[in-house]
Image: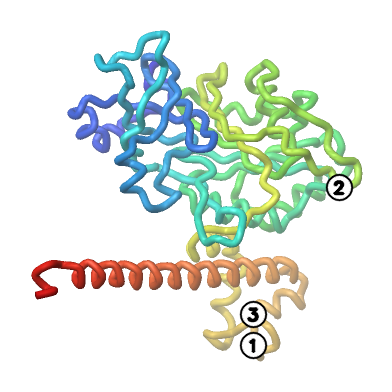
Amino acid sequence: MTLPALGWSDRFVPHFSLYRAAGYVPARVVQEHRGRYQVYCETGEYSAEVSGKFRHLTTSPRSFPAVGDWVALSFASPDGIASSSDRHAIIHAVLPRQSEFVRKAAGSKTEEQVIAANVDTVFLMTGLDHDFNLRRVERYLMLTWDSGARPVIVLNKADLCPNLGDRLAELEEVAFGVPIVAISALHGEGIDALVSYLQPGYTVALIGSSGVGKSTLTNSLLAHAAQTTQAVRADDSRGRHTTSGRSLWLLPSGALLLDTPGMRELQPWATEDSLSQTFEDVEALATQCCFRDCRHEQEPGCAVQGAIASGTLDPKRLASYQKLQGELAYLERRQDQQAQLAEKQRWKQIHKQLRSHPKLRQ
C-alpha cells in the first residue's frame, strides 16, 4: 500500500523530515481502542502503542493519536523491519493535523476529544424520520467549520419522507451554501451524488447520531457488509450504538471513509469564529441593532427581534444561537480556571523543590 493511497500529501513532508532522519516511517492510524492503535504504512498493517517518552511528555488528551492521524512509527523488531510474525510497532510522535473534528468529552471534566483527524470532508448525516433535528444540525455545522474540513449534509432515509421538499427548505435556512444530498442508504438511492467527494486519497468522515444509517452507508460504499447494522426504535428512530469505535476504511474508489459511533452527546469545543460562520444570518442582523451590546430581547431598535416579528428569522434559531453562545462562554471560563489551577500547582511544585534544595536549607 502506498502512502498517497492512505491520504499522504506533500503538506506532511516538511513535518516528517526530522523523524525520517531518526529512522522512523510515516503511518496512518486506522483504529483506536483504549490506548491501542491499528496503523497502516507502506509495509502493511500493525498493532501499535505510544512510546513511554510520548506518554510521559504528553499532557493533553487532544495530543494523543486519533483515527486519521499521521504518526512517526518504529518497529518493535531490533533490525527495524517487522516480520510477518511480529506486527507490533511504537508511535513516537503525531504529525500536525490539517483538520480535526473535536468535541467536549462526555462527563464533567473539561477535556476535549478528537473524533476524526486529517479529514477533507465531513458527511453530516441525519435521518429523514424522527431523528431530523435542525438544532442538532447547527451544532454539527459549528464543529465542522471549526475543524477545518468542509461540511456536506447527507439526509438519509429519503424513502421514508413524504415531504422531502419541505425538509430541504428548512435546512437551507440554517445551512447557507452547504451542499445537501438526500439518499436512501438501505436501497442505494442517491448515493451517486456523493461520488464527487470520494476521490482517491481524500478522507471523508461520517458524523451523526445513532440510527441515522452511517454503518449502512459505509457498507454500501464498501460494497460489502463490513459494519453491523440494526433497526432503530420505532418510537423515536434512535439507534443502539452498533458501531463501537472509529474506523478508517479504504473504499473501492480510492477514497478513505472514517466511520464513527453515534454521538448521544455533542457538547461543543469550538471558537466564536465557527459560531459566527454557522449563524451568519443572526450576526448580520445584530450589526443593525441600535445598541452594540443588544441582548436581542426587548431593547428598542433590535434588528434581530424585528426579523422575528416580520417572520424572516425563526425564534428557535435565535434561541439556538444564544444557547451555543452561552455554552462556549462557559467552556472558556472553565478552561481559564483550569489554566489558573495548573499554573498555581506548577509554582507550588517549584517552591517545594526550592525548599528541599540542600544549599537553600543552609
Question: Residue farthest to the front?
Answer: 362
* Residue 180 visible in the displayed image: no
Q: CA distance from mark 2 to mark 3?
A: 37 Å
**Residues at marks 2 and 1, CA–CA distance in whole angstroms:** 41 Å
Q: Please report contact status of discs 2 and 3: CB closer than 8 Å, yes or no.
A: no
Residue type, mark 2 in image? Asp
The answer to which of 243 and 218 lies nearer the viewer is 243
* Residue at 35% in and 32% down: 91
Q: In the picture shown, does residue 274 fall above or below 166?
A: below
Amino acid bearing label 3: Ala
Which residue corresponds to mark 1?
Answer: 301
Q: Please report contact status of discs 3 and 1: CB closer than 8 Å, yes or no.
A: yes
Determine the CA span between mark 3 and mark 1. 6 Å
Q: Amino acid at mark 1?
A: Gly
Left or right: residue 14 compared with residue 299: left
For the residue labelled by badge 3, is the local secondary structure a helix, a strand or a loop? helix
Q: Residue at x 40, y 14 (%)?
A: 86
Q: Residue at x 50, y 66 (%)?
A: 272
- Report the side of 90 relative to 248 (left or right): left
Q: Tag 3: Cα neighbours inside 10 Å, few (<14), some, or many (≥20)?
A: many
**Residue at the spot of label 3:** 303
Answer with left or right where residue 310 lies relative to residue 100.
Answer: right
- State which quarter of the image contains the C terminus: bottom left
Residue 236: numbered disc: 2
Mark 2 crowd level (few <14, some 14–19, many ≥20, 10 Å Cα): few
Is label 2 in contact with label 1 (beta carbons under 8 Å)?
no
- N-terminal of the two: label 2 or label 1? 2
